Image (cartoon, rainbow, N blue to C red):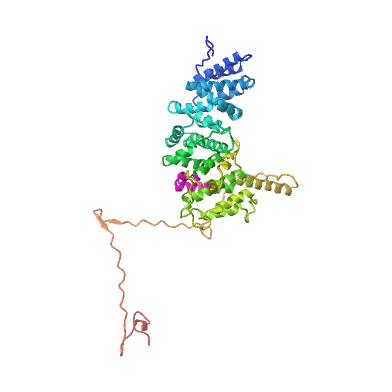
Amino acid sequence: MADVQGAWTAENEQQFWTALNQILSAPCDSYELLDNALRSWLDLVSKARDEYLDDEDEIANCSEQLIHSPLFSANKDYVRTQIIYSLLQEDEYAPLHVIANLLLSDGRTEEETFRQMIKEGCFLRLLELIKGCGAKDSRLHRLLLQLMYEMSRIERLRDEDLMQIDDGFVTYLFQLIEALADDANDPYHYSVIRVLLVLNEQYMVAATSAATEASSPISPITNRVIKILSVCGDSYRTFGENIILLLNRETETSQQLLILKLLYLLFTTVATYEYFYTNDLHVLLDVIIRNLLDLPSEMDILRHTYLRVLAPLLAHTQLSKPPHYKRGQILSLIEILRGTGNAHFMPPEPTTIRLLDRVASTPWLADEEPESPSLSPIGSLSLSQTGSAVSVIAKVSEKPGVKTPSRKSEMAAATVQTTTTKGKSEHGGSPPRPPPPRTLRTQKSLPEVPRHKHGVPFVHPPVPPVPHRLHVHGAGQKKMPPKLPPPRRRAKMVAATGDGVRTPSETSSPVGPAPG
């Protein structure tokens, strides 16, 4: 409720939601009233953050109520501008949390919000806040990382923004991934990993634009992500393990492309050829084979990116050394994607064929001895040796939120449709009728089966137990006598003959002489 000075307070959670509804439903006929309503909303939610709004979804609910209120819908541009300026000027963590949550909720609905934030210089502000609040407010820290990721994947960052990222900030992010997670909902630090992935993409886009745009800076912008992994990759291997796990589980196309872009640079840079453990490379190869076989025919962009990553993966990493992992399956994959003798895969277009030929030309797949590549002065393979230009990979993109279709799902849907069509044709165009419900009858007890062929039960007499000890006159115990020994064998009778002794085979009976 509003006090004497006009500030809104709430003594319990019910009063908080009531006050919030009153603020958002009040008419605002002037900018002064609108500013007062925004300040009241921000002040009320900020105070309730640590008292009633322990869950992030509850703060998001407050943001959604503001976005769907008449106060916001009638003045969208003005409210967004005021909130963005508040992000640039506010220093208290609780109001910053509420502001960042509102911008994140609004930007996911209207991408123009993120573009306006980049124009107003919000990237540098987020960079500063993430560095400073990590050890002081973990909830705000995670939210700022999400906001930086969502904003950076919508629009290209300005060159001056990228140049403000130093080695210390990127190293700080890698160190967060190596540390234990303090959030049970994000045990693998995916929020941090996604920021590194999107920064790598921004570096790739900047490097591509520098060669074509005259306004680009004279000195190329250093990719800090690849630089840190090239110099200190052995200290940050958890990041590599987690991006493979993320690729294995990810269903969003844009997320897969972000991971593949980083993998391409890692496998085409000499210093990071062996950044991954061999077992992790085995898992990665299994994931790539599975995803390539599961992609529908229309997903050419994603398929091309997978194949561009597969070629240097097989040629430059530990997989190029014997024993070669799954060589037969890789060759089968190449034949399947070429459409050789497989009715489920359409004949590929020229780009796919060219990329498949590149994969098939890997020396250990073609039974040829690998040759040591000539290195360029900067320590990486030249553009012609890597096969695909970085610009091709950098330009690949997809709208956020688009899920990657699955070939298995399409085949299952086609099977269901075929079954339905067949049922309609069998029933004269009408859908098949469901079977009639079953009527359960009461089960009768079965007659008892006689134990004798004449129907008379045969009762076995009880067998008395054999005592082990006998009582003699009630005094002492007498042990049972031992069993009788077996009968002694009788010696075979051997008849004497005039010229010697008869053999046992000549005796027809074991006892007595043979009959004459």
Q: Residue at x 69, y 46 (%)?
A: 420
Residue 84, can we see it? yes
In which quadrant of the rendered view does residue 360 lie?
bottom right
In the depicted view, which residue is nearer to us: 168 or 340? 168
Give yes or no for residue 276 being in the magenta stretch. yes
Give the x, y percent position of residue 167. 45, 34
Q: Nearer the viewer, residue 59 or 84?
A: 84
Q: Quick check: 462 left or right of 441?
A: left
For the residue pair 251 and 280, the one nearer the viewer reads as 280
Residue 131: give x, y in percent of width and height. 45, 28
Q: Taking 28 as reference, is 277 left or right?
A: left
- Where residue 186 sits: x, y (%)? 48, 34
Magenta span: helix, strand or loop, mainly? helix
- Asked whether, in this view, residue 494 is left or right of residue 109, the answer is left
Residue 209's quadrant in the figure? top right
- Residue 50 visible: no
Which residue is located at x 70 percent, y 45 percent?
Answer: 433
Q: Examine the structure image and report whether residue 439 is included in the region drawn in magenta.
A: no
Q: Which residues are magenta?
A: 267-288
* Furthest residue toward top: 4
Q: Indicate the quadrant containing the N terminus: top left, top right, bottom left or bottom right.
A: top right
